[in-house]
Image (cartoon, helix red, strand yellow):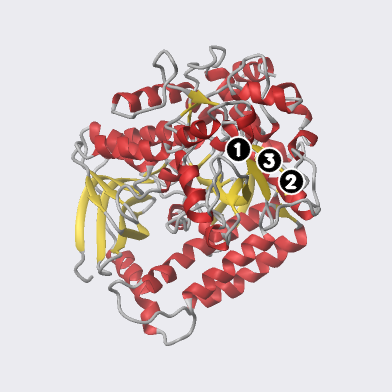
Amino acid sequence: MAEYETFEKDVLVIGAGGAGLRAAIEASAAGVSVGLVCKSLLGKAHTVMAEGGIAAALANVDERDNWKVHFSDTMRGGQYVNNWRMAELHAKEAPDRVRELEAWGAVFDRTGDGRILQRNFGGHKYPRLAHVGDRTGLELIRTLQDHGIHQGIEVYMETTVVTLLKDGDRVTGAFAYERERGRFRLFKAKAIVLATGGIGRAYRVTSNSWEYTGDGHALAYHAGAELIDMEFVQFHPTGMVWPPSVRGILVTEGVRGEGGVLLNKENRRFMFGDIPDNYKSQTADNEEEGWRYTQGDKAARRPPELLTRDHVARCIVREVKEGRGSEHGGVYLDIAWIKEKLPNAAEHIRRKLPSMYHQFKQLADIDITAQPMEVGPTTHYAMGGIRVDAETEMSKVAGLFAAGECAAGINGANRLGGNSLSDLLVFGKRAGEFAAQFAKEHSAGDINNDQVDEAARAALEPFERSDSGNPYKIQDDLKEMMQELVGIVRKEDELTRALESFDDLWQRTRQVSVTGNREYNPGWHTALDLSNLLTVSEAVTRAAIERKESRGAQFRDDYPNKDAELGKVNIIVWKGADGSMQMRRDEIPPMPDELKKIIEEMG
């Protein structure tokens, strides 16, 4: 085996967003050595783009809120295919994780009497999102990073893992390359935590940054772990649509939480005409009532713009398809209208939504205090991911843990806004805690030199081919295919066409070539990302075909209704012995009577 720069740690955390940082902090606090690998620079995590807030039942704005209501909202939003134990743990532990963050220095917006302020968000019954204007994710990362650097965590920036190494059924390390100079790095570890984020770069229109190529999903899948709920991809209803250079950039749900309304080109609030029966008792009947709720009036109900993200996204698509969309193929999001209600509306908007104000002013020359925004759905979040144990976050592979977006279970068919940040805090902590415990209870496993040599050989193969395939073109073709055939509205014939196209995409990927050398070579990096993107895209497509119903983020135009039997199962994806992608349906374990009673009581 060639000599590689080698590092040995008790716990290796792959991914330095909120989940990875929280896991690394917890593992280090347990007294084990911790390495933190990040694909980009430390602090440049996609968690920064989570702007609206952290969902936690602190009950600072409405004393009726508690963990039971939060649990019920999460299960209802996920259409009851969630891992109910994860939803329970999340709802119970989120308040402590937020207070802990505050103790570590996070600066939240405040109520008049000095408590953490909370705002309304889609699918949440009460104002629940602790926030810092519309820069909550940035504050979360800053706080975790500032706290974490004092914990003795070794950070390896701009390093991408290409494969996990195993000793029998157990993970023992990871093989990676340094993006700047192209040197390989070998990490030996007793336990590994995957916290690599999502899969958004498999789609043409996405709010996700370039790192989101499904790395953790694919690493776990090829190491023998199971993936779950891959058919459920969340399309955030509000991304920028104009100009073309900004298409897909996120427009936080906080705009609607602060009173923003959705309008079609006829200047009509179309969401009032499409409220599901199970939400009518909680949803405003008119604009005045919706405004009062937005401002915290407990007697009023939430505006229809704050229904769940899957529902709002489909309503926007309908308006556009039926010819009532905006000039550039979206709809209008208007928060300037609140000047009718507030004498200091412009100042209020700039104070509560500073990032959105500057984003539209700088990128689209729009003043959101005076003009409506053009918005449309953008690929945002993967509910599906690595199947983990609810208590420990360990996957089927011994010593391999996962947390954050690359893990799955808590969100079911649709994630509620704000649950992602509390999810990564709650389960990032748990993953770090139990990874450290695993490392203490096990000695270091062996590193298989053949696995390392094979990983190095495969990574360098693109340099040995001559002009046989452009990695950027392959990725572009994949994104276009996923956008058009496996998007918001799905049909059997289109999904089948997508599935058939994977043979060609895989063949082209196996023949991809790059020019230049290993140093400073983004073409090579793109070529190495392709396998991960194809793996997760195929998993999404196969699972979408298997679930012949519409539920949450999976909308089948040919099966528009829910199927009672499919509502009792999760779709599981794993790698067969012959290397092919396998699938099965697993029954969801029965929910304990006390949790069933909570859901019944919450309506």
Which amino acid is tagged 1? Ala
Res. 335 in view: no
Which amino acid is tagged 3? Leu
Q: Quadrant of residue 523?
A: bottom left
Evaluate if marks 3 and 1 touch, with contact meaning CB atoms under 8 Å apart.
no
Dot 1: what SS?
Answer: helix
**Lateral position of residue 9 relative to residue 301, left or right:** left
Res. 35 in view: yes
Label 1 sits on residue: 336
Dot 2: what SS?
Answer: loop
Q: Nearer the viewer, residue 281 or 339?
A: 339
Mark 2 or mark 1: which is in front?
Answer: 1
Which amino acid is tagged 2? Asn
In three-dimensional space, the C-alpha distance between marks 3 and 2, rounded to whole angstroms, equals: 7 Å
Q: Quadrant of residue 601?
A: top right
**Lateral position of residue 146 relative to residue 532, left or right:** left
Q: Which quarter of the rendering shows the N terminus?
A: bottom left
Position of 439 relative to 594 (above/below): below
Give the mark nearer the N terminus: 3 vs 1.
Answer: 3
Q: Residue 75, percent across and down?
A: 62, 29
Position of 17 relative to 455 (above/below): above
Position of 121 relative to 362 (above/below): above
Any mark on residue 262, and which? 3
Q: Nearer the viewer, residue 571 or 79?
A: 79
Mark 3 or mark 1: which is in front?
Answer: 1
In three-dimensional space, the C-alpha distance between marks 3 and 1, rounded to whole angstroms, equals: 12 Å
Q: Residue 474, percent across and down?
A: 53, 73
Binning the other alpha carbons within 10 Å of mark 2 as few (below 14), some (14 to 19) or many (20 upward) gives many
Q: Residue 460, percent across and down?
A: 34, 75
Evaluate if marks 3 and 2 touch, with contact meaning CB atoms under 8 Å apart.
yes
Question: What's the residue at 66%, 14% (across, down)?
Answer: 299
